[in-house]
Image (cartoon, rainbow, N blue to C red):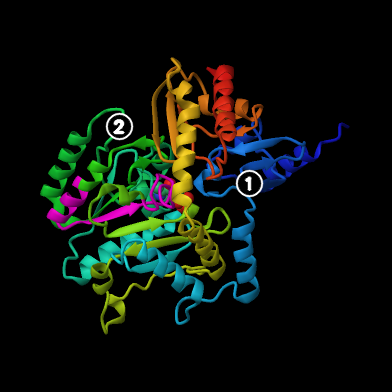
Amino acid sequence: MTTMSATQALQRRSLDAVWHPCTQMARAESVPPLPIARGEGPWLHDFDGRRYFDANSSWWVNLFGHADAGINAAIKQQLDTLPHVMLAGCTHEPAVRLAERLSARTGGALGHCFFGSDGASAVEIALKQSFHSWRNLGRGDKREFVCLKNGYHGETIGALAVTDVAIFRDAYDPLLMRAHIVSSPDSRLDNEAEALAAMRALLAERHEHIAAVIVEPLVQGAAGMVMHAPSYLKALRELTREFEVHLIADEIAVGCGRTGTFFAWEQTGADWPDFILLSKGITAGTLPLSLVLTTDAVYRAFWSEDVTRGFLHSHSYTGNALACAAANAVLDRFDAGQLEANRVQAALLAEALAPLAADPRVEHFRQRGMILAFDVKKPGERFAERFHLAARAHELLIRPIGATVYLMPPYLIDAQQTAAFLAEAVRRTLDDVA
Ligand SMILES: *Cc1c(COP(=O)(O)O)cnc(C)c1O
């Protein structure tokens, strides 16, 4: 009998006991999960002495890499003081402080903060708050939602109903509420005017029945880092005002400095949306937390002596104190100049990847802050999986989406060498598979 390595043993136990997310488990038998022993900064270490640069920030959440001492210290302090208390009937300093600080970042325009646990729960909350606020105002007919083509908002049944990614959605389509799916702007297609015209036509026809439009500002992440100009969002804000429809900005992926400003929305120069959703990076990959920020107008619509006109929604871990402490530690980084640091890092990455942008094997190289992406012209079969596996040999952990390769690294591009290392690892991987 051959003995298994520590790596193989953990892989076997994982395949026997863990149902891995977003994975065809039959396929996982031949492509087993990579056991990770520990993380430090941008690096993940396996059990065999190899390391991997976490180029996608572990699904876009680990803003400061792994085991960040400052964030950890804040959590440890909170752990010994008050890890959790229910937020119905009680309150606590970390939640209040976090809500106040996020409100201040919108100049008070989005002054009310509701807490959820994951991104999808924030989407559910915003959809319910939008519908219920219209209902409380005597406009219960406004109960339809609009989302964009290829948009992604999570995978619970409500969130999936406003998601247009076939591979996640199709099996459950019979279960989902019907939403309007409108063409989305895509910098590769230069189609902003058509996308806006389609939105105008729908709102003009259905606005009396539409509660809200939900969008991912500036970058549609799961669609494959599809980008659009801030001008689209500004025009969309004007349209939704004209037709009295809420606008929900899902910043779960693009918030927290990812696109160059704390909220992606800040780049539009438009009025604030009615809702902003945050999750993923807000705790920098330490604890699950999501937030729904909304306006006085929405909040006031629930204000009543009548209990049933209130928002009676809750999750067990809503406003978890440990998670809020982590989020406050993340905001401390932004108060201390993180956005300026990101600007420098984004420029380093742009410079290092410039040769790749000109590589004849790739097209549509694009960047928005700390998101860089390109499409591979002739990807061939199972490109994403082959690229992912080949990259490991170059110390790179990366998961393309279809034929789109993207970098969404931790905000730890501390020097030209780090950026050059990333560019080199991507190029060598491309040489291996394309
Ligand atoms: C990841 C994501 C979600 C869902 O968040 P989960 O925490 O995975 O439920 C929603 N919207 C966007 C834009 C996302 O990227």
- Magenta-drawn segment: 235-263
Residue situated in front as seen by the camera: 313 or 405: 405
Q: Say if disc 2 is inside 8 Å of ligand 1.
A: no
Q: Which mark is residue 41?
A: 1
Q: Is residue 251 magenta?
A: yes
Q: Is residue 344 above or below residue 87?
A: above
Specify the quadrant of the image occupied by residue 192.
top left
Specify the quadrant of the image occupied by residue 9.
top right
Amino acid type at mark 1: Gly
Specify few, some or many for label 1: CA neighbours under 10 Å numbering under 14, 14-19, or 20 or more: some
From this viewpoint, is residue 351 visible?
Answer: yes
Question: Which residue lies under the disc numbered 2?
Answer: 187
Q: Is residue 43 magenta?
A: no
Specify few, some or many for label 2: CA neighbours under 10 Å numbering under 14, 14-19, or 20 or more: some
Where residue 416 appears, as percent x and y from the top left, is 56, 33
Q: Is residue 136 above or below residue 105?
A: below
Where residue 345 appears, as percent x and y from the top left, is 49, 40
Residue situated in front as seen by the camera: 404 or 307: 404
Where residue 282 appears, as percent x and y from the top left, is 48, 56
